[in-house]
Image (cartoon, grey):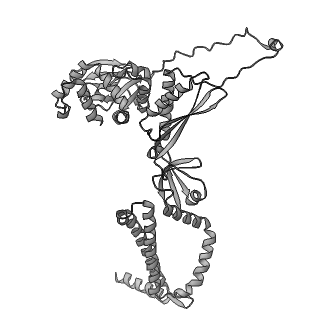
């Protein structure tokens, strides 16, 4: 240890004895080393102060995140600059001698970092003017998404697929940007549709307006509008204008998709046809090309490459269910949309009896076995097209049997969270489910008694009317 101490003492003496001249200022290597360490300490302190100001202190006084960002930067960097200058003066550095060098160096840096400077100024402008804020839904060229971060250098936009795009701030200042949140509460969506000539326009208008107001997220003020756009080559062209709250802009592709599904459903119900482009070809001299025609040509019939197993129609299976059979095509589509596919390996257990119901299932391919450990026997074998688990999901009843795959299986499943969201956002769908359950009151009574026996029936659900009990049960389970 004494040897190490002596060695360090000699090193420090050597560094202190070696001096460098900076104009009229003379500094030793030891002084320079201390200056570097002090500068690093000031940098770390400035960075930490910036985070504390933005994340804790200023959050209590300033609501806007962009303003917090500016104030935190000014305070922290101002404090850092003050400490750095004070450190130089304390070390004996003559600041006046660095003026010329600093000015020349600053000019060179300014010329070399013009883009950085432009982005910095643009970022400060965005933060101060608040034309683009965090949480806004914007469109810039072919980029659409929510603004996730606004800094002095760039703006981060979150896309629908979960990725992020980093845009230099200067691009948003110098180019056209559509901000769907700026000083507005509603945003208009447009659905274009063509109908066959001969269709009554008033009927089209009524149908489109009915489709618009069937969507829960479409606001009533301003009201939806139907615009008769044009007499097209093949159709009467209409536009449906609907308004949604600006907070739903991130879901506008799904909203437009739901509107188009609804329009197809009600057009079909009301006998309104959607035409396709057609052209008529007239032959002036058909006899001149008759010799090129071969009406007796026999087209080859493709050989049977093996009998293919027919595809399972999820909508048809749902319609055949006791509890979903009364739903219309739109409601069936909503069920299909929220479902997922799940594969099972041979002998893999899907769920066991007495487990809470987390979804209902349709067998697309393969074979599953329903069995009970309590009785020690197999209750049923279910193949493609079989449906099970719907009542347990809707009433929150524990599984009464276990299910496992007898061979490799592919299942369609609607899980509890997606089913819950569907019931919460679609009151008509909830009422349709209640009406469907009402057609099986005997089964409902048995299930209610089973829940009461197991102590799973809440006091607030007690009601002698079985339909009132179903409503209370769904309200308690799904909100």
On the question of residue 188 being in view, the answer is: yes
Q: Which residue lies furthest to the front in this view?
A: 202
Q: Is residue 81 above or below residue 474?
A: below
In the displayed structure, 296 sits above or below 468; it is above
**Tally of numbered tags:** 0
Q: Residue furthest bottom?
A: 24
Residue 458 placement: quadrant: top left
Name the quarter where the N terminus is drawn.
bottom left
Q: Where is residue 440 in the image (x, y as percent from the top left)?
A: 28, 19
Q: Residue at x 51, y 31 (%)?
A: 260
Would you place residue 370 above or below residue 341 in this image? above
Q: In this view, does 427 lie to the left or right of 274?
A: left
Task: Give the left or right position of residue 106, taking residue 130 as reference.
Answer: right
Write the residue at 60% across / 14% down.
303
Q: Is residue 351 visible?
A: no
Residue drawn at 59 percent across, 53 percent down: 176
Answer with left or right where residue 417 lies relative to residue 33: left
* Camera-nearest residue between 38 and 75: 75
Quarter occupied by the C terminus: top left
Name the quadrant containing residue 345.
top left
Looking at this view, is 457 or 103 the one in front? 457
Q: Nearer the viewer, residue 57 or 113?
A: 57
The spot of residue 134 in percent (x, y) is 46, 55
Outermost top residue: 296
Quadrant of res 341 = top left
């Amino acid at each position: 240890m004494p040897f190490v101490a002596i060695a360090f003492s000699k090193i420090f003496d050597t560094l202190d004895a070696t001096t460098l001249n900076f104009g009229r200022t003379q500094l030793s290597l030891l002084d320079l080393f201390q200056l570097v360490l002090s500068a690093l300490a000031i940098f770390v302190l400035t960075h930490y102060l910036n985070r504390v100001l933005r994340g804790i202190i200023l959050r209590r006084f300033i609501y806007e995140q962009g303003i917090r960002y500016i104030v935190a930067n000014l305070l922290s960097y101002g404090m850092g600059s003050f400490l750095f200058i004070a450190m130089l003066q304390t070390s004996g550095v003559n600041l006046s001698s660095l003026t010329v060098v600093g000015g020349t160096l600053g000019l060179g840096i300014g010329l070399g970092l013009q883009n950085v400077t432009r982005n910095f100024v643009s970022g400060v402008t965005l933060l101060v003017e608040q034309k683009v804020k965090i949480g806004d839904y914007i469109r810039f060229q072919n980029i659409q998404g929510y603004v996730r971060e606004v800094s002095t250098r760039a703006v981060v936009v979150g896309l629908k697929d979960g990725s992020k795009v980093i845009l230099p701030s200067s691009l948003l200042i110098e180019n056209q940007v559509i901000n769907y949140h700026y000083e507005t509460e509603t945003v208009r969506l447009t659905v274009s549709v063509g109908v066959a000539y001969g269709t009554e326009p008033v009927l089209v208008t009524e149908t489109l307006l009915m489709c618009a107001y069937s969507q829960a997220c479409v606001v009533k003020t301003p009201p939806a509008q139907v615009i008769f756009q044009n007499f097209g080559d093949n159709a009467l062209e209409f536009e449906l204008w609907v308004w949604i709250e600006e907070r739903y802009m991130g879901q506008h592709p799904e909203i437009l998709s739901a509107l188009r599904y609804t329009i197809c459903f009600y057009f079909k119900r009301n006998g309104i046809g959607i035409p396709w482009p057609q052209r008529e070809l007239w032959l002036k001299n058909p006899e001149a090309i008759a010799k090129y025609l071969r009406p007796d040509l026999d087209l080859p019939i493709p050989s049977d490459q093996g009998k293919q197993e027919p595809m399972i129609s999820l909508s048809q299976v749902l319609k055949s269910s006791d509890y979903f059979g009364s739903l219309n095509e739109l409601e069936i589509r909503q069920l299909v949309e929220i479902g997922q596919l799940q594969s099972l390996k041979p002998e893999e257990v899907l769920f066991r009896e007495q487990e809470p119901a987390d979804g209902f299932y349709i067998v697309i391919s393969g074979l599953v076995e329903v069995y009970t450990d309590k009785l020690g026997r197999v209750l049923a074998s279910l193949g493609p097209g079989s449906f099970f688990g719907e009542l347990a999901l809707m009433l929150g009843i524990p599984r009464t049997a276990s299910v496992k795959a007898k061979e490799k299986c592919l299942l369609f499943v609607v899980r509890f969270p997606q089913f819950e969201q569907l019931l919460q956002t679609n009151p008509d769908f909830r009422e349709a489910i209640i009406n469907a359950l009402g057609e099986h009151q005997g089964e409902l009574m048995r299930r209610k008694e089973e829940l009461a026996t197991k102590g799973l029936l809440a006091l607030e659900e007690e009601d002698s009317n079985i339909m009132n009990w179903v409503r209370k049960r769904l309200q308690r389970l799904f909100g």
